[in-house]
Amino acid sequence: MNATTTALRAAPTDLEGRIRALEDELTELRTRVPENKVSIILLSGDFDKAMAAFFMANGAAAMGMEVTMFFTFWGCTVIKKGRKLKGKKFMHKMVNLMLPANSKSLSPSRMAFGGIGRMLFNHMMKGAMSPLEEQIELAVELGIKFQVCSPSLAIMGFDVDEWAVPVDICGVAAMYDTALHARTAYFIS
């Protein structure tokens, strides 16, 4: 056999090897490409920031994206059913008395005006956008996943049955697992 015939017979094997290498590289790259997901981490218990978080979440879900919202510290008050004091330790009762009871009692981050600010915002929003409570209901209907920070529960004295939406109580590792695989991640404080 001459050199040309030997090279032609070796080419398919070399080509197959190169294709295999490219497929392996493509598989490895796919593990690093963000998925069609959005992660929203809400630290704030302010009305306007909660509205922004739910507008972004519902908009992404309406576009077909998988959305997970992680609530921590003051952000937990946004999705609570109400104020629960029975069975709590003294310090947890005090913390719960100082926090808003639920989404209806959140104040705006600015222009609170001693409680009048939320009423003004609700009046201005009437007919222009749906209230926060409707945004929360829509998020549930759209299948948005809700995570509540387990260390926040322990510190703030919240119980596992205090939520107005279905929640997954988890730690920071679960939040990072979601955020690191998301196409977009927001932190709202």
Image (cartoon, helix red, strand yellow):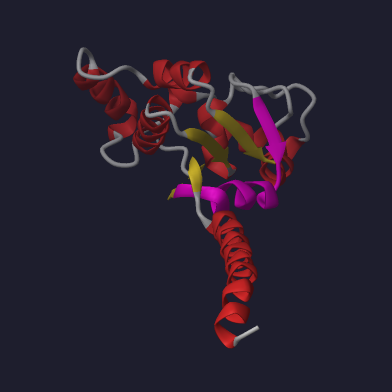
Q: Quadrant of residue 28?
A: bottom right
Residue at 29%, 26% in the rendered image: 116
Point out the image quarter for the N terminus: bottom right
Residue range corresponding to the magenta coloring: 167-185
Whether residue 172 is in magenta: the answer is yes
Q: Is residue 87 left or right of residue 33?
A: right
Q: Is residue 70 left or right of residue 139?
A: right
Q: Please identify the residue farthest to the front as the structure is shown.
A: 1
Instruction: Indicate the position of residue 88 as horizontal and vertical percent values.
Output: 77, 30
Whether residue 98 is in magenta: the answer is no
Instruction: Indicate the position of residue 150 as horizontal and vertical percent values.
Output: 71, 42
6 or 83: nearer the eye?
6
Instruction: Indicate the position of residue 100 as horizontal and vertical percent values.
Output: 51, 30
Residue at 19%, 21% in the rendered image: 124
User: Measured along the vertical axis of the image, is residue 187 above or below residue 66?
Assistant: below
Examine the rendering and report whether any part of residue 38 can be seen: no
Examine the rendering and report whether any part of residue 22 can be seen: yes
Instruction: Indicate the position of residue 3 as horizontal and vertical percent values.
Output: 59, 87
Q: Quadrant of residue 63?
A: top left
Residue at 59%, 31% in the rendered image: 146
Q: Quadrant of residue 163?
A: top right
